[in-house]
Image: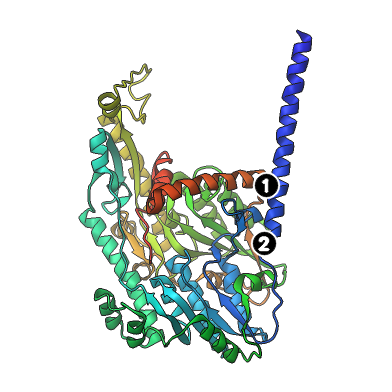
Amino acid sequence: MNSFFKTFFAALLAFVVGGILIGIFAVMTFAGLAAMFSAPVATVGSNAVLKIDLAEQITDSPISSPLRSLDLRTMRVRPSYTLLEALTAIEAAADDDRIAGIYLNVAGGSAGVATLQELRGAVSQFKESGKFVVGYSDFYTQGSYYFTSVADRVWLNPEGTILWQGLASNVMFYKGLLDKLGVRAEVVRHGSYKAAVEPFILDRMSPENREQTTTLLGSIWGSLLSEISASRGIDSALLQNYASDLALRSASAALEYGFVDSLLYNDQVDSLLVSLSGGTGREPEVVTLGQYIAGHRLLPSPSANQVAVVYADGQIIDGPSVEEYVGGQTVAAQLARARTDDRVKAVVLRVNSPGGSALASEVIWREVELIREQKPVVVSMGDVAASGGYYISCPADIILASPATITGSIGVFGLLFDAGDALRNKLGITVDVARTNPSADMGVPFRPLSAAERDYLQYQVESVYGTFIGHVAAGRNLSVARVDEIGGGRVWSGVSAREIGLVDGFGGLKTAILLAADRAGIADDFSIREVSEPADPLTEVLRSLSQVRAASVESELGLAFREYSRLQRMLGERGAQAIMPYTFDIH
């Protein structure tokens, strides 16, 4: 018997040690691959052209591990950099004598509207250096054309097109499916505009949701038209008519209506770039934005005075951050470190979040409130800072947004499901229970809520909502009644949010950092410190493997994958939620 146990434990030990060694080998292998295939550092000669292609991944928060850039499906590294790096690089290029101009070659990319506005603003500021900015593509989406329209000259392939049709937001409803299955959604919420739960209780948009969605899209579309009109000299009313009439049916129509300046092939563009840059070869000397970032130290030199940048990038969840989720515990700890570090003189909280757990939002809010008592704190809103994303923003001294930032959504909801009838009628499964108290099994998906339980949950929602609007009222110096009036779960664009006092002004991440430094009195001598958690190599490997599984699901679901992911995140939360009802694409 003793020999058996000795053999058993020896085998178990060998298994554990072997697993650890395999894990270490996998980490080293993937790290080596990431290093091997990472973007090469380019040598920038004279008369170089900085090429900006949004196919390179732009992230809000820093990627903590090189493995994040490794796509295990293709075994290739997708170049990536942060928005701050991109903005700083464009600013540096304006003063770099080796850079003759910028070439925008933007066919697609996944950047949001507010991110595009920040990048476009940086390119517009670059033009003040007197250097050229040109843009070319075989095909323009509305987003890529908006970005490229800032260029001095815009070119298009003679057989190319510009997608120009306006903005839309499609909402998928599941009530009909739930009815067929015999599943009933149990919803408690505060705010008639809090539309995140509507897909489970309605089969079409409520009047309130249609109103807020139409207003939001109209505001963002109007902002884009205004900027394009100023750059291209086309009246906004005409731009609107062209979209309504689907007038851009060909490249020649785009030329006729003033959207582009010339119809050219790629080789002709290369020749023009050589001429514009003062080059002597047959092809222009091009350096990509990623290569320029990789080869140059772009952030300010280290200083005893620091502006800390903390990122809340993703859906907010309880506990620590995982993958693309913002953990209340993790972000609160990062903010606490910045608060207690004497070298940090000011803090910028970069928020790009649709919200999530109300409790986790409260945990983060508390730390922002504590920082405000000791040092300046500025919030920089990205593509979306709504619901819980606005909850954590409201205590800041100053809130900056882009005109297209989606924000507000000051509302709370809880969502449960009763699948008891579905199990019994469709599958013949019944569920029984023994309990010590009437509501001991409250929340199980096998029975409806009692009147007392619904009253209990509604109280929880009302309590969280009351706390939410109280925080907003105190942070924004508004009355509770006024916050309730503009709250109710309603979503606003950055333009509307500024008008009603939810944000202080327009500006991107760089502007927020400069403003924070100025308020701290260190504008002439400071460095930027991006606060992030160190990556765990084994966790990164496992995360990469999980991405392969996600990719296989995406290949099956196609365009429905994003909706699937959104539902998975929302239904995975417990307790009161403060989350934005939907997203939309600029196309």
Residue nearest the observer in this picture, 412 or 247: 247
Q: Which colour scheme is used?
A: rainbow
Q: What residue type is labelled 1?
A: Pro
The residue under label 1 is 537
The extreme top residue here reads: 1
Q: Where is residue 430 in the image (x, y as percent from the top left)?
A: 31, 20
Assign a secondary structure to mark 2. loop
Alpha carbon separation for disc pair 2 and 1: 17 Å
Image coordinates of residue 312 in percent, x first then y, are: 52, 56
Q: What residue type is labelled 2?
A: Ser
Residue at 27%, 34% in the rendered image = 183
Q: Is residue 324 left or right of residue 19?
A: left
Q: Which residue is drawn at 59% across and 51% down?
A: 72
User: Please, is residue 320 above or below residue 343 in the view?
Assistant: above
Q: Residues within 10 Å of mark 1 (few under 14, many from 20)?
A: many
**Quadrant hosting residue 155:** bottom left
Mark 2 = which residue? 38
For the question of whether residue 195 can be seen, the reply is yes
Q: Do the residues labelled 2 and 1 touch (CB within 8 Å)?
A: no
In the image: residue 274, left or right of residue 379: right
